[in-house]
Image (cartoon, rainbow, N blue to C red):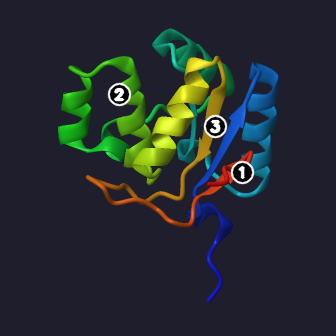
Amino acid sequence: MATNVTNATKVHTVSTMQEAKEQIHSFIAQGYAKDQLFVLAHDKDRTERLAEAMDTERIGLEEEGVMTAVANLFRSRGKELRAKMQSVGIRASEAERLEKELDQGKIVVIAWGGKPYENEDYDPLISYYPPFLL
């Protein structure tokens, strides 16, 4: 049985709001629902503005779980972002790399497959663009 494309998590790193908007439209064309789409920026206000402008969701309680959501209230922004990314299946080392991209002003656009992750669990099938080679 083939896996539905919208069950696969995809992560794109872009430089501008226009590129983020184009990527959101691409994910919608691929069959992702708006409640599966997230945008992240290092600055919390910028994340809110992007999510509002693009009509996407915020990674919140449903995706993070209660414990992570509460812990995020006391974390630095970098740790909070990494925890949010990990809650949608991004491996800790990838979340750290992506957070460095966010530090440089990039925007991370996520099409989430829908499965929440906890602790060190992650989705080994996530596709990243641009690809990250070890």
What is the number of the mark on residue 80? 2
Query: Residue at the front extreme?
Result: 134
What is the number of the mark on residue 83? none
Q: Residues within 10 Å of mark 3 (few under 14, many from 20)?
A: many
Q: Going by the image, does 18 lie left or right of 122?
A: right
Task: Select label 3 or label 2 by which is in front.
Answer: 2
Question: How many marks do you count on the picture?
Answer: 3
User: Tags 1 and 3 in contact by the CB under 8 Å rule?
Assistant: no
Q: Residue at x 47, y 62 (%)?
A: 123
Q: Residue at x 51, y 46 (%)?
A: 94
Q: CA distance from mark 3 to mark 2?
A: 16 Å
Task: Select label 1 or label 3 by which is in front.
Answer: 1
User: Tags 2 and 1 in contact by the CB under 8 Å rule?
Assistant: no
Q: Going by the image, does 100 lie left or right of 128?
A: left
Amino acid on which disc 1 is placed: Pro
Q: CA distance from mark 1 to mark 3?
A: 14 Å
User: Which sits in the foreground, 90 or 111?
Assistant: 90
User: Which sits in the foreground, 35 or 100?
Assistant: 100
Residue ID for mark 1: 131
Q: Residue at x 66, y 19 (%)?
A: 53
Circle nearer the N terminus (3, 2): 2
Residue 95 to residue 74: above or below: below
Amino acid on which disc 2 is placed: Glu
Task: Select label 2 or label 1 by which is in front.
Answer: 1
Q: Going by the image, does 93 lie left or right of 60?
A: right
Residue ID for mark 3: 109
Q: Residue 104's spot in the image, x, y percent?
A: 63, 19
Circle nearer the N terminus (2, 1): 2
Label 1 element class? loop
Q: Residue at x 40, y 24 (%)?
A: 78
Amino acid on which disc 3 is placed: Val
